[in-house]
Image (tube, rainbow, N blue to C red):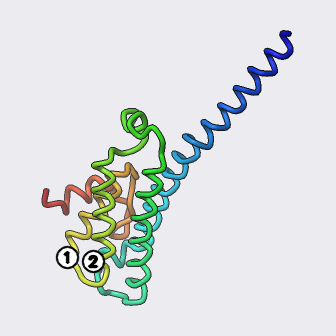
Amino acid sequence: MQYWTNLALTTLLAVLGYLLTIGVIRPLLKFNNKKFETGILLNYFSNIITSPGANKKLADEAQQKIRWLAMELEADYLGVQFRGVFTGLKEIPSIKTMIEVKRSLVFLSNSVHRGDIDKNHSEMGKVFVKLGIKEVDVDNGIVKAMEIYKKYSKE
């Protein structure tokens, strides 16, 4: 009898572990990967973002990729189960913060061809700060994203 009880408990734990992995852990990891992909992409396009209109071909590419990234980041965020718990644990940003990040990314996407350089710096810094990405490569050096955000933000 004990054999069947142990087998049932082991099977139950295996199924629960699988469901936890599929339903909770995997979406959280997917969101975190997308968050860091955002940092990499913004670093890659930082010259175009901070010098609107400098290179039309690269600006066209940046516009499309940044806009798509904003949508993917939102979708991955919404895919995370128990967002309230993970927000409370500071593992993911709040929904209000994610709305700000999405707006900033869409703004940057719209302003790569023409736009205010200081506002672009501010919005890029805001994305890094709000997502918790620690550093950004700007002006040929490593600068803390918070410093950029404070320097260019009008808020």
Look at 71% across and 26% down and name the residue there: 12
Look at 36% across and 45% down and name the residue there: 93
Q: Choose between 103 and 79: the one closer to the eye.
A: 79
Spot occupied by residue 136 in the image (x, y as percentages of width and height):
38, 60
Spot occupied by residue 36 in the image (x, y as percentages of width and height):
48, 56
Look at 49% across and 52% down and name the residue there: 31
- Tell me the distance, in whole angstroms, between the alpha carbons under discs 1 and 2: 8 Å
Residues at marks 1 and 2 touching, judged by CB atoms closer than 8 Å: yes
Corner quadrant of residue 39: bottom left
Kind of residue sitting beneath label 2: Ser
Spot occupied by residue 74 in the image (x, y as percentages of width and height):
41, 57
The residue singled out by tag 2 in the image is: 111
As drawn, which residue projects farthest toward the left? 154
On residue 127, the disc is none
Q: Is residue 22 left or right of residue 67?
A: right
Look at 47% across and 54% down and name the residue there: 76
Where disc 2 sits, the SS reads loop
Corner quadrant of residue 100: bottom left
Location of the N terminus by quadrant is top right
Q: Nearer the viewer, mark 1 or mark 2?
A: 2
Kind of residue sitting beneath label 1: Asp
Spot occupied by residue 70 in the image (x, y as percentages of width and height):
39, 64
Q: Choose between 30 and 45: the one closer to the eye.
A: 30
Q: Earlier in the sequence, mark 1 or mark 2?
A: 2
